[in-house]
Image: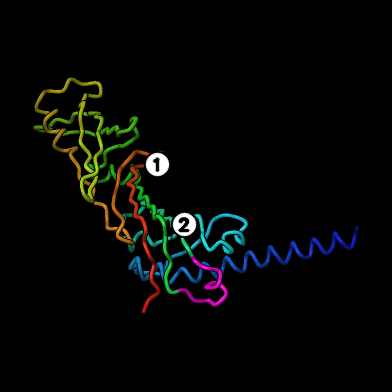
Amino acid sequence: MRAVLIAFLVLLGIALAADRVLVVISENLLVEAVQEEGQLPAEPDISIEGFPFLTQAVSGRYESVRVGVDVEALGLPPGATADIRLQGAQVPLSSVFSGSVSSVPVERVEATITFPFAYIGEQLDGATVTRDGSGLRIETTVSVLGQDFPIAATADLALVGREVAVTARNIEGLGVELPDTVVSVALDLLDLSLPVPELPFGLLFTGVQVVGDGLEVVAEGRDIVLEEPA
């Protein structure tokens, strides 16, 4: 029994080591194809998710591959984040062993871009922006004819092409009565279009939503083939 147990542990160790080695090889194979097809200015950080890896390698299909990109190079502002995932990437085991891959079919690419509330507030001249259900709450001060009026507003979100439209409504004074003129000025000041840079792989933007730390813009693409650079 002791010999059997030792043999089992040795085989388990070899399998785990092979698992980790194949992960590294596969990730390196994907780097060039992802950078070329996505026209990325810098080499991406590729991470194949899921354990054990061997079962994915044998099937030649990777459930989820995370692509780490330089957000500044994408044209995103400081504090913004980008999460890009390849779902159902297909890399034959023979390509892993040979160390070369000519193309990588991907069933689906999902991406989310998150703009923090602080950045949105900066675009609104220092307003305080927080979540309000599916929209935003904006608190700021409006100056009209030399007088300051502290206000609060709710704002709706809409995705228009590659811009997020922030439209204020329900303007109210914070402890003060607001003249109609102030309300009108506030509506104009809080009207914001937030541009979203183009994403790799020709992804199409599909929606925008409020999450815990900011605005999240969602994009996706289907049946994309990553080609090896010529």
Query: Circle 2 is placed at which residue position?
Result: 88
**71 displayed left or right of 93:** left
Q: How is the image coloured?
A: rainbow
- The region drawn magenta spans 91-101
Residue at 84% over, 62% down = 6
Frontmost residue, 230 versus 157: 230
The location of residue 66, given as percent across then percent down, is 47, 57
- Asked if 141 appears above or below 53 in the picture, the reply is above
**183 displayed left or right of 164:** left
The location of residue 169, given as percent across then percent down, is 20, 29
Query: Circle 1 is placed at which residue position?
Result: 213
Q: Indicate which label's residue lies in the foreground, 2 or 1.
A: 2
| Tag 2 secondary structure | strand
Q: Residues within 10 Å of mark 2 (few under 14, many from 20)?
A: some
Residue at 17% over, 20% down = 177
Contact between marks 2 and 1 (CB within 8 A): the answer is no
The location of residue 122, given as percent across then percent down, is 27, 45
The CA distance from mark 2 to mark 1 is 29 Å
| Quarter containing the N terminus | bottom right
The location of residue 60, given as percent across then percent down, is 53, 63
Give the amino acid type for the residue marked by disc 2 in the picture. Gly
Residue at 25% over, 24% down = 174
| Tag 1 secondary structure | loop
| Quarter containing the C terminus | bottom left
Q: Is residue 93 magenta?
A: yes
Give the amino acid type for the residue marked by disc 1 in the picture. Asp
- Asked if 208 appears above or below 12 in the picture, the reply is above
**184 displayed left or right of 130:** left
Residue at 16% over, 38% down = 189
Mark found first going from the N terminus, 2 or 1? 2
- Asked if 60 appears above or below 152 in the picture, the reply is below
